Image (cartoon, rainbow, N blue to C red):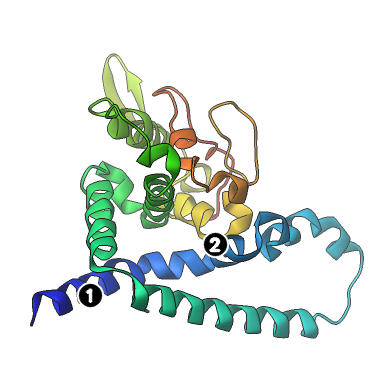
Amino acid sequence: MPPNQALVTLHADYIGGEHANYRKWYFAAQLDLDDAVGHSQNPGLNRLRSVKRNRQGSGDNGGVHTTNEKSLKIAQERWRLAMNSMSQYDRLRQIALYLLCWGEAAQVRFVPECLCFIFKCADDYYRSPDCQNRIDPVPEGLYLRTVIKPLYRFIRDQGYEVVDGKFVRREKDHEDIIGYDDVNQLFWYPEGIARIVLIDKVCRLCFAFVSKKSYSRFRSEPDTTCGLGTLTTIHEVR
């Protein structure tokens, strides 16, 4: 296989191909609509805002579904054209960035949708003027210290606690623990992403958050969680 074709194949496997997990996440989280029309018109967030109104009445939503299906097809075609027109440099850069994020992700590798979110933030930041005009490099270990470590501690503390200086398993039922599946579910849909709390403790709509400055705003202190502590999607009693 020629080198150029090998690069296209690798990029399709990791990022842009039909079966790539990142592409599936991108459309499931409706970031295609956010990138195209802005977060204020994103239907996932509109559902979140109007949930009370939906419970009070019912009606024919056939037209809405038809419109959404057409929008999805247009977005998928727009994605395909963008992937086909991408330069080899950008393909290589995205693969390298994704693998760098994955390689230092520790247990966050087990929450791939969260990792997709991190990659999206990092990729947007890399292409932003803030990053391109930056002169000084970021401090060594910043990604591990301010992104991965807080997430790792949050996941760890769900199942373990320190007793006499040693980590021991918490005596909690499975339904009371926020596990990998719960974290994945949070990042899988726009309604979940919208619940993320930033480091200033302000809960903002994430589609305003995933922007050119989102990677720097995603950083948090080691003792700060990222607003994941209120969502449990798996209700299983053991």
For image coordinates 44% across by 70% down, the residue present is 24
Name the foreground residue: 195 vs 81.
81
User: What's the residue type where badge 2 is placed?
Assistant: Leu
Q: Residue furthest top?
A: 164
Q: Residues within 10 Å of mark 1 (few under 14, many from 20)?
A: some
User: What's the residue type where badge 1 is placed?
Assistant: Val
Percent position of residue 176, x then y: 52, 42
- Examine the rendering and report whether any part of residue 171 can be seen: no
Q: Which residue is mark 1?
A: 8
Q: Residues within 10 Å of mark 2 (few under 14, many from 20)?
A: many
**Residue 79: numbered disc:** none
For image coordinates 88% across by 78% down, the residue present is 59
Residue 201 sits in quarter: top right
Q: Quadrant of the N terminus?
A: bottom left
**Left or right side of 66 for 217:** left
Residue 31 sits in quarter: bottom right
Q: Which residue is mark 2?
A: 31
